[in-house]
Image: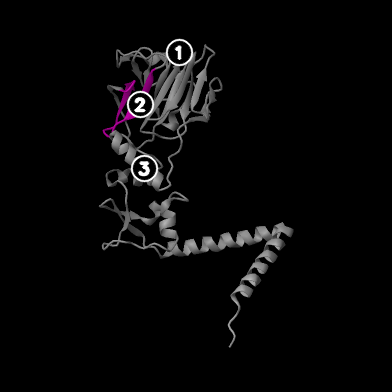
Amino acid sequence: MAFPDKEAIGEGHDQAMEDTTKQQEEDPICAIEAKLAEWLAIEARVQSALAEVPHLITLDVGGTLFKVPKETLLQEEGSYFHALLGSGHWKPDTTNGAYYLNLHGGTFDRVLTFLRTRRLWTEGLNLYDRAQLRASMSYLYLSAPSLAWDADKCAPQIVLSAENATASKSSPGKWVSVLGNTPVSSFRLHLIELGTGTYVGLCPRANFDVGGNGQGYYIRLPNGVKSTLGTLKTQTTKYSDEAFETGDIVAVRLSDAGNVHFEKNGRDLGAAFTVEDPSVDLYPVVVMYKNDVVKFVPL
């Protein structure tokens, strides 16, 4: 029996591929339908593989075990966990039935909190742990929402720029405010230009008011007065003798104990408030009167 000629088979395969490619080039609808069919087939394989995965997944993260519901790990489309569980190629690789991840176990609980809440907590971490947490997030293809000012929660007198990281107000005569686009436990602002009536703090989204009267936790930067409303009429309690100036960096942090702290150029000024309801998400907020320019900077 004569064996098939490999070269002839290769030529025949190449010709068939050329014919298919030519047909698709001549018929764009055919090409789109072929791509769609290919995508649907891949999606079906992924869903089938995910259905076979148990509800509770064990992860061995740098020697620390975590048991996590499958639904939690799959919260972020396109993450490492989608590939791990949905490809069908990888199985638990330790004797205790866990998937091993060569990541920092000491901060991995923060990754899981992010997957559950879309909130990345860095409060209480030293510089090394923060770097490890960022490395884990990058390795797992997880991205926290970029912190910026929310154009839908912004007074018309405030101008946003630099991909909404910078908020500016030059016209005097009216109190106005802008809210951040994502809940945070901490943030930092560069005071590019500081006016006479600027308040910075944290505020629940439901309380936000474009006129600066949203109930929250504020410090008036020029004189160190703290307030639960970002307006002059409520400045009754002295918080700090430290006055902020143009060029300073102000940081706002929510501690694990539920206390709001303010920092000036990296120095903690102490606890200013205790949050009433720790379960309520808090957003960055700034209240301006005139001649203000502030910009988010990395923690």
Instruction: Give the distance between the C-alpha atoms of the residues marked 1 and 3, in whole angstroms.
Output: 38 Å
In this rendering, the answer to whether 52 lies above or below 65 is below
For badge 3, the amino acid type reads Ala
- Quadrant location, the N terminus: bottom right
Q: Which mark is residue 135?
A: 3
Most common secondary structure along the magenta stretch: strand
Q: Residue at x 70, y 66 (%)?
A: 19
Residue placed most toward the observer, 104 or 211: 104
Q: In the image, is 210 to the left or to the right of 276?
A: right
Q: Earlier in the sequence, mark 2 or mark 1?
A: 1
Helix, strand or loop at label 2? It is strand
On screen, residue 40 above or below 235: below
Q: Is residue 230 visible in this depiction of the protein?
A: no
The residue beneath circle 2 is 252
Q: Nearer the viewer, mark 1 or mark 3?
A: 3
Residue 142 painted magenta = no
Q: Quadrant of residue 38?
A: bottom right
Which mark identifies residue 195?
1
Three-letter code, disc 1: Gly
Q: Is 246 placed left or right of 260 in the picture? A: right
Q: Secondary structure at mark 3?
A: helix
Q: Earlier in the sequence, mark 1 or mark 3?
A: 3
Q: Which residues are magenta?
A: 248-266
For the residue marked with disc 2, what is the amino acid?
Val
The image position of residue 29, as x and y in percent, is 70, 58
